[in-house]
Amino acid sequence: MDMLNDTTITEALRNVQDPELHRDIVSLDMVKEIHVDGTAVALKIDLTTPACPLKDVIETDIEKAVQELGATEVDITWGASVRRATPGQQQENLVPGVKNIIAVASGKGGVGKSSVAVNLATSLALEGASVGLLDADITGPNIPQMMGVEGQPSATPEGKIKPLERYGVKVISIQFFVPQGQPIVWRGPLVGGAIQQFLRDVDWGELDYLVVDMPPGTSDAQLTLAQSVPVTGSVLVTTPQDVALSDVEKALNMFERMSVPTLGIVENMSAFICPHCDEPTEIFGRGGAERFAQAHDLHYFGGIPLDMKVRQGGDAGVPAVAQREPGKAAEVMREVARAVAGRVSMQATVEAPTLTIT
């Protein structure tokens, strides 16, 4: 009997698991095409995200499984189909083309939350995903400067706001609509209304991920987002020192009360890497976020070192991950983005939570 046919190959691939999702690639509907020509096998495999952090592991396991059937050549064509992790009627109404909403949040200001949001969105776009970036820090918008995008959005024929685009990321911010330097002194209801309008009235199109840069702390903005759309999950940003960790715990508890899953925590400014000797200096302490993650059963995305290129890029409007010569911090940020994408794929396998506020 010929061991190389669609049936035997499919059965063999049932033994290949996605290491993060802990399910086989057949049941996950990742195997799209199988072609057999003698002992040569061609496969079309769709990953659950173009930023899959374990693609190489899956590729090795596929090749081994098919070669054990007698194949001498295994050619894999890769694709990606990001899945909606939080299906829901509200999300369909407000942002019909957005599959996943990721809130980047912190318990306090000054921890580099916006920098993480900018580089997360840009990294996902560089991986091949369709990405939007919503600046929900209405009274302190920094995203336009950090992304190097300026101007005023135009309107579509349907009357929607057309977001500006840079580095493959669609961007919207209140800063596009007010003169530079003019303060935005708004009460909570106005802030909430602006966020809802950016969700409802912006022509986001089809997006795999909408990254939302939240204002620091716990406020009406977070509540508005959670009540308006099903949020796939939050990414918490902190620095190693205790004062930042005590505040990020409040943010964690806030998202838990709003039934928003926390995808994990990232430690920013984990150490300063000397540009002359590469010796790390832990200015703000060591390992605080990792200990916090262990204590609260959270995923730890890693520590982003202090890097002058991040600051320079933020001032110049060039995210660290998009620079011609990215530094160590940019490398870690790319890894963090892949890990976040992986956690979103995992979230897509569970039922979306129901918002409950007490």
Image (spheres, rainbow, N blue to C red):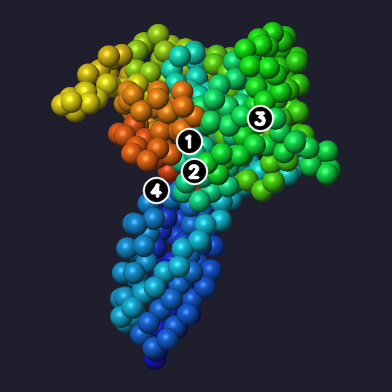
Instruction: Measure how far apart labels 4 and 3 are at the Cα level.
Output: 35 Å
Residue that appears at 49% across and 13% down = 109
Q: Are marks 4 and 3 in contact (CB under 8 Å)?
A: no
Are there few (<14), some (14-19), or many (20+) residues within 10 Å of tag 1? many
Q: Is residue 327 visible?
A: yes
The mark found on residue 53 in the picture is 4
Relative to 65, does residue 48 appear above or below in the rendering? above
Q: Helix, strand, or loop for circle 4?
A: loop
Q: Quadrant of residue 259?
A: top right
Which residue lies under the disc numbered 3? 151
Q: Is residue 345 left or right of residue 336?
A: right
Instruction: Measure how far apart labels 1 and 2 are at the Cα level.
Output: 6 Å
Which residue lies under the disc numbered 2? 124
Instruction: Measure how far apart labels 2 and 4 are at the Cα level.
Output: 12 Å
Q: Which residue type carries mark 1?
A: Leu
Front in this rendered view, residue 56 or 321: 321
Which residue lies under the disc numbered 1? 120
Front in this rendered view, residue 172 or 355: 172
Instruction: Measure how far apart labels 3 and 2 are at the Cα level.
Output: 24 Å
Residue that appears at 32% across and 63% down = 60
Return the x and y of residue 244 as percentages of the image width and height: 42, 13
Q: Which residue type carries mark 4?
A: Pro
Are there few (<14), some (14-19), or many (20+) residues within 10 Å of tag 3? few
Q: Helix, strand, or loop for circle 1?
A: helix
The residue sitting at the right extreme is: 158
Q: Which residue type carries mark 2?
A: Leu
Residue that appears at 33% across and 24% down = 308
